[in-house]
Image (tube, rainbow, N blue to C red):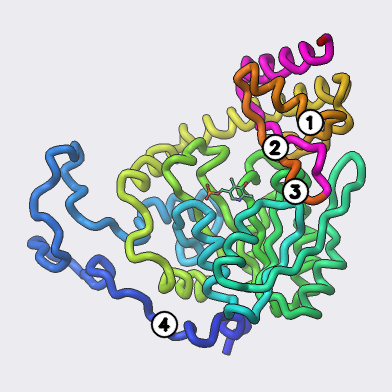
Amino acid sequence: MSAITELMRPDLRDFAGYASARRSAASGRVWLNANESPLASPADASGRLNRYPDPQPAALRERLATLYGVSPAQLMLTRGSDEGIDLLVRGFCRAGIDPVLIAPPCFGMYAVSARLQNAPLIEVPLRDEGEAWRFDLDGIAEAALAKRARLVFLCSPGNPTGQALSSAEIEGLLDRLQGRALLVIDEAYAEYSREPSSSLLLAKYPALVVLRTLSKAYALAGARIGALLGDPALVQFLRNLSAPYPIAAPSAELALSGLTEAGVIEARRRVEGVRRERERLRQALSVAPGVRRVYASQGNYLLVRFDDAEAMLSRWLAAGIVVRDMRAMPGLGDALRISIGTPAENDQLLAALRQEACA
Ligand SMILES: *Cc1c(COP(=O)(O)O)cnc(C)c1O
C-alpha cells in the first residue's frame, strides 16, 4: 500500500462515490439518462444549463494545471479552497481519532472543518518576532509525529499574519514528517508573495498538498473556484468523496474566460499594484499615532496592533470603512486586519486614521 493510501480513512479507501449520470456517460446525442429537462430555461441565455455540468470541467482543469505547473491528474477543481479543506479532513481523519494540526493565529476554516468531522485539533502557535511572525517548524514536526496528526495545515502567506514559508523550509518539514502526515500548504495569497509556490515540490513529495484559489488575486471570490494540487491517487480519492457536480457551469466558464493570457497578465499587473499599495500603507501606518505595530506581509492585507483598537474600529466604521476585527483571536487582542484596497480607498482609510489622531 502506498504511503498516501495508508493515510486515507480505511473505511473510505475503496469507496467509489456517487455514480453520477455525467460520470458514467460516454458519448451520445440524445440524452435521456439524468432526468434533466430536454429544453433550456427561458432565463438561460446560454441554452445549456438544463444539463448537469461536467464534475471536473476539463478545459478549466487543464488551464489551471498549466497555470500552476502541474499535470491535470494532479489537480482537482473545488468550490473554493474551503471545499478542498473540508474534503481533506473528511477523507483523512477518522472522527474522534485522527488529529489535524494548525499553527494559530491562522485561517479559521481548518478548525471549523476539524470540528465538523470531530477530528482532534493540535495547535502549535506561530511565534511573534516583532517585525514578522514565524512558524515553529521544529514544534510542528515534533507534535505532528508524537500525536499522529493526519493533516498539517499551514497557510503561506499566513492569514492574518502575513509571513511566508520558503521552499527550503517546506522541504525540511516534509523530510521530517516522512510521509506520516499530509502537509497542506494553503496558498490562497501566493500571487502576492515573494516565495515561489510549493507546487514545485509535488513531484518529489506525494504527502504534499497545495491549495490555490481564484478568490483573491484573480478577483473571482463570488464564482467559488479553487484547486487542490496533489498526488494523482490523492486527487482521485478526494474526487470520489466530493459532491457529484461541485462546479457550477457558469462559474467554470467565467473562470476560464478570466484565465486567458491577457487575463493572467492583467491579474499580475494588479498584484504589482497591490504590493505597491501594501508598502505605502505599511509605511504610513507604521508612523501613525496610536499604531503599536504593523507586521510585514506577503499577502494583500496588513495585520496591525493599536493602542486602542476599539476606538479605531469605530472611527473607521463611522467613515464607512470596514476592516476585520481580529481581537477574538488568541494573542491578537489589540489587532485589526486591513485588506489592501484601491489607492483611493487606502487614502480614505489613512484620512480617517489621521482624523482620529487629531480628535
Ligand atoms: C480567502 C482564503 C481562502 C480562500 O477560500 P475560497 O474558498 O477559495 O474562497 C483559503 N485560505 C485562506 C487562508 C484564505 O484566507
Say what amino acid the circle numbered 4 marks.
Phe
Q: Where is residue 264? Give x, y as percent.
A: 51, 37
Task: Please name the residue that numbered disc 3 is placed on.
Answer: 329
Sequence-wise first label, 2 or 4: 4
Q: CA distance from mark 1 to mark 3?
A: 13 Å
Label 1, label 4: how far apart the Cα atoms are? 50 Å
Which x, y percent locates residue 12? 47, 82
Q: Are marks 2 and 4 in contact (CB under 8 Å)?
A: no
Q: Residue furthest right?
A: 130
User: Left or right of 217: which side holds 45?
Assistant: left
Of the residues tagged 4 and 3, which is closer to the observer? 3
Asked whether residue 351 is drawn in magenta, I would say: yes
Q: Residue at x 71, y 52 (%)?
A: 106
**Residue extent of the magenta highlight:** 331-358
User: Which residue position is annotated with label 4?
Assistant: 15
Mark 3 vs mark 2, CA separation in Å: 9 Å
Residue 325: mark in rendering: 2
Q: Earlier in the sequence, mark 2 or mark 1?
A: 1
Quarter holding the C terminus is top right
Is disc 3 placed on a helix, strand or loop?
loop
Give the residue displayed 78% in from the left and 37% down from the top.
335
Residue at (81, 23) in percent of width and height: 285
Assess whether mark 3 and mark 4 are in contact (beta carbons under 8 angstroms).
no
Looking at the rendered structure, the secondary structure element under dot 4 is loop
Image quadrant of residue 309?
top right
Circle 1: residue type: Ala
Can you say whether 243 is above or below 335 in the image?
below
Say which label, 4 or 3, has the lower sequence index. Answer: 4
| Kind of residue at badge 3 | Met
Amino acid type at image mark 2 = Asp
